[in-house]
Amino acid sequence: MLAIGRALAFGAHPDDVELQAGGTLAAWAARGVHVELACFTAGEKGSPDPGTDPAELGRVRRAEATAAAAALGAATPVHFLGAVDGELEVTMALRLAVARLVRTVRPDVVLGHDPWRRWLLHPDHRAAGTLTVDGVVAARDPLYKVPTGAPLWGSPDPSRSTGAPPRGSPDPSGGSFTPRPGPAGRRPGRRRRTARPRRGRRRGAAAPWPG
Ligand SMILES: [Zn+2]
């Protein structure tokens, strides 16, 4: 039995979550975990062809993200947060959008880019990681004006309050975000993760997300 029942994963662009954590999410979904995916942008600049129409590419990538979510066993549609590809910024509005999703989806685990990972090249990935972590904090705290009627949810991992990387991380650069599923039978709320909604001591490893 898995120790989690619900998971929510944030990526800067379509394909980020699928490439970095798709196997884990598919395995969780196959074992009954409710999985939801969110994208800060539609990835409309994600082409090497300068003649590409960004609006059309965005439509294609949105559709592909929905198809990928279905293939993984995740819920559809994917949550698109409406930021412009390549121009993602850490704003209060997007932080609250993350918090709204966390409060409404109410995940046991949140996955995303590691904003503290060294040499994380793409600025959208750095911003997405920061927004994800900051949004989890806003979902927890009562005075943030989160646009949802859903009640508070979660608390940040206290191990991250010092900036320390998770123990057991295989990433030699010293950080990661994505928790791996724990062994069967572990009680809920017992695994370590970067941004997680429940208090308690954390254990386990994590996997890096490339830049
Ligand atoms: Zn990306």
Image (tube, grey):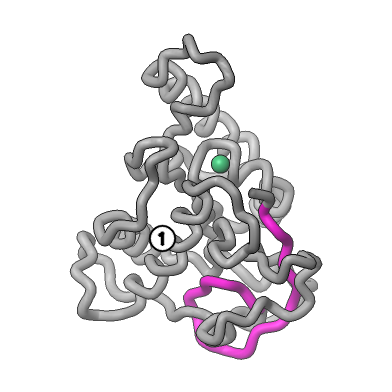
* Residue 150 locus on image (x, y percent): 27, 66
* Quadrant in the rendering for residue 194: bottom right
Give the labeled residue for mark 1. 131
Mark 1 residue type: Leu
Q: Is mark 1 within 8 Å of ligand 1?
A: no
Figure quadrant, ligand 1: top right
**Pick the front one: 189 or 65:** 65
**Pick the front one: 40 or 140:** 40
Write the start and end of the magenta stretch as one range.
192-209
Specify whether residue 200 is painted magenta. yes
Above-or-below relation of 160 to 180: below
Q: Is 14 displayed left or right of 185 in the figure?
A: left
Residue lying farthest to the top in this orientation: 51
* Residue 73 locus on image (x, y percent): 61, 43
**Pick the front one: 157 or 75:** 157
Please give the name of the residue rendered at 49% of the width and 48% of the height, measured from the top-left corner.
Answer: 123
* Quadrant in the rendering for residue 83: top left
- For the residue carrying disc 1, how many other residues have a C-alpha within 10 Å: few (<14), some (14-19), or many (20+)? many
Q: Secondary structure at mark 1?
A: helix
Q: Is 127 displayed left or right of 174 in the figure?
A: left
Please give the name of the residue rendered at 59% of the width and 46% of the height, measured from the top-left corner.
Answer: 17
Residue 43 visible in rendering: yes
Specify whether residue 128 is painted magenta. no
* Residue 168 locus on image (x, y percent): 79, 76
* Residue 167 locus on image (x, y percent): 74, 80
- What kind of secondary structure does the magenta stretch mostly adopt? loop
Please give the name of the residue rendered at 33% of the width and 72% of the height, measured from the top-left corner.
Answer: 138
Question: Quadrant where the N terminus lies?
Answer: bottom right
Please give the name of the residue rendered at 61% of the width and 58% of the height, measured from the top-left corner.
Answer: 33
Above-or-below relation of 58 to 155: above
